[in-house]
Amino acid sequence: MINALRGMKDLIFEDAERYRYVTETAAKIASNYGFEYIETPILEETRLFRRSVGESSDIVGKEMYRFTDKGGNDVCLRPEGTAGVVRAFIQAKLDRQQGQKYRFFYFGPMFRYERPQKGRLRQFHQFGVESFGEKSVAEDFTLIQMLSDIFDALGIRYSVQINSLGCDACRPPYRENLVSHLEGIREELCEDCRRRIESNPIRVLDCKNEHCQELLSEAPRITHNLCDDCDRDFQQLQDLLSNARIPYRVDPNLVRGLDYYTGTAFEFVSDEIGAQSAIAGGGRYDRLVEYLDGRPTPGIGFAIGIERIMELVRIPEKERSGWYLGTMIPEGIDSILKLAHKKRKNGEKVVVEYSPKGLKGHLKGADKVGARYCAVIGEDEWKNGSIWVKDLLRKEEKVIPIQEA
RNA sequence: GUGGGUAUAGCUCAGUUGGUUAGAGCGCCAGAUUGUGGCUCUGGAGGUCGUGGGUUCGAGACCCAUUACCCACCCCA
């Protein structure tokens, strides 16, 4: 037997329905916010992710599905969605339209070669949005509001965490500041933290080790080291969230793992799904378009981890719908097929049972496929060109000429 | 990459200190006055016990290896 590859899952039956419900709900809300659908290739040049997501991230460093194609190109299955959309944005020369706003949403599979666990697959799906050209922090607020609208619509409980990562003006000095502080207590930190001082010092701040946390209580916080512009934006964001009655918590340790983030960073967290609790994350990336050779353009986006919310989603109960057609005698099949096609052309859902069988068998069959109407041709109906129809919901039945069915 | 757990019917799982024909529930199929669904009752089909070695008179149970899945670290959505 051939099984799906490790960390890859089939979306079938209820899972498939849940997936569709999530993407359709989110897409509807995103378009209400003025976002347009975009679909970019799943395969991209490796360079794209190295320059956007960043060499220092684990995603690029060790989790990419990477290979050389037959043309000798160094390519990767996309590990996230933003890079491709930004590439498309620049390729379409939209960055030349300075002052214009462009807003996109997308959804689809992403690939990371990680050890699978609850809420973490190698092929997983994200729904994301990217907004280009709008530098106002009101857009940051609007994306967070959109996310809460989406989760509200899906019936998912969440908490919101926000932070500001600063800009080119305030982040580098803060980083130096932090590193020198960490160097001072280096010997007492755990092994992981010592390593992170070089690779990603801000990460040290959210070490799970209790001893480290005690030592870190004195460490400088990014939120106290923002420049005037960043600080003003961050304050305004908080005001906007409060006015909109969106509960949030400032978490100075919230760090995005991707190098391209600047300014506002946010995360939506659920406490009902195990260790992989981040159900959505995003933030600003005002320099990313430049990194990828575009004209400087502010940007901000988020992504939802669809698998992580799948089991939390409350889907509406589906009701009986459409038709089940069957016959009790072999001669009836032509009439059944003709009727089925007429109804299908008419936009109705129809399931046909080809084998003749007793009425009871057909009723059971209709029940099983969730049909509302069960229509059967038997001996009597065959003789006078009629068909027996039962409404399974109202328990009403009638015999009518087949032309009228 | 590291650690722990699990692997028996389509699904969820029982299976006593190793001992005859490996069980249940659900699902599936067929019946319960010959043309009336969901409920009930009866019967039936379905398993080389993940795979490969080993210990033993004898292994689904014990040992080793291997693979897969699950959970956690890590990382992140």
Image (spheres, coloured by chain):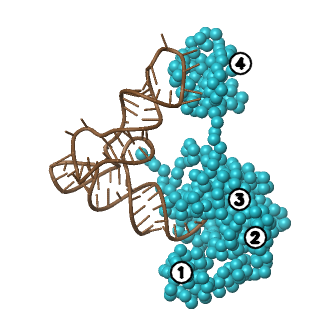
Chain colours: A cyan, B brown
The residue lying at 58 percent from left, 85 percent from top is: A182
C-alpha span from label 2 to label 1 = 29 Å
Rendered image: mark on residue A212:
1
Quadrant hosting residue A123: bottom right
Q: Position of residue A101 (x, y in %)?
A: 81, 62
Is residue A351 depicted above or below A78 in this figure? above
Read off the chain for label 1: A
Residue farthest along the right direction in this orientation: A99
Q: Are marks 1 and 4 on the same chain?
A: yes
A313 or A336, nearer to the observer: A313
The residue lying at 73 percent from left, 77 percent from top is: A167
Quadrant hosting residue A266: bottom right
Amino acid carrying mark 1 in the image: Cys
Rendered image: mark on residue A404:
4
Q: Are marks 2 and 1 on the same chain?
A: yes
Helix, strand or loop for disc 2: helix
Helix, strand or loop for disc 1: helix
C-alpha span from label 1 to label 4 = 78 Å
User: Sequence order check: which comes first, mark 4 or mark 3?
Assistant: 3
Q: Position of residue A324 (x, y in %)?
A: 61, 27
Q: Which residue is mark 2?
A: A238
Please name which of the two marks, 4 or 3, marks the residue nearer to the observer: 3
Instruction: For label 1, count other residues whose C-alpha is less than 10 Å away and answer few (under 14), some (14-19) or many (20+).
Output: some
Is residue A330 depicted above or below A213 in this figure? above
Amino acid carrying mark 4 in the image: Glu
User: Sequence order check: which comes first, mark 1 or mark 3?
Assistant: 3
C-alpha span from label 1 to label 3 = 33 Å
Image quadrant for the N terminus of chain A? top left
Q: Which residue is mark 3?
A: A147
User: Sequence order check: which comes first, mark 3 or mark 2?
Assistant: 3
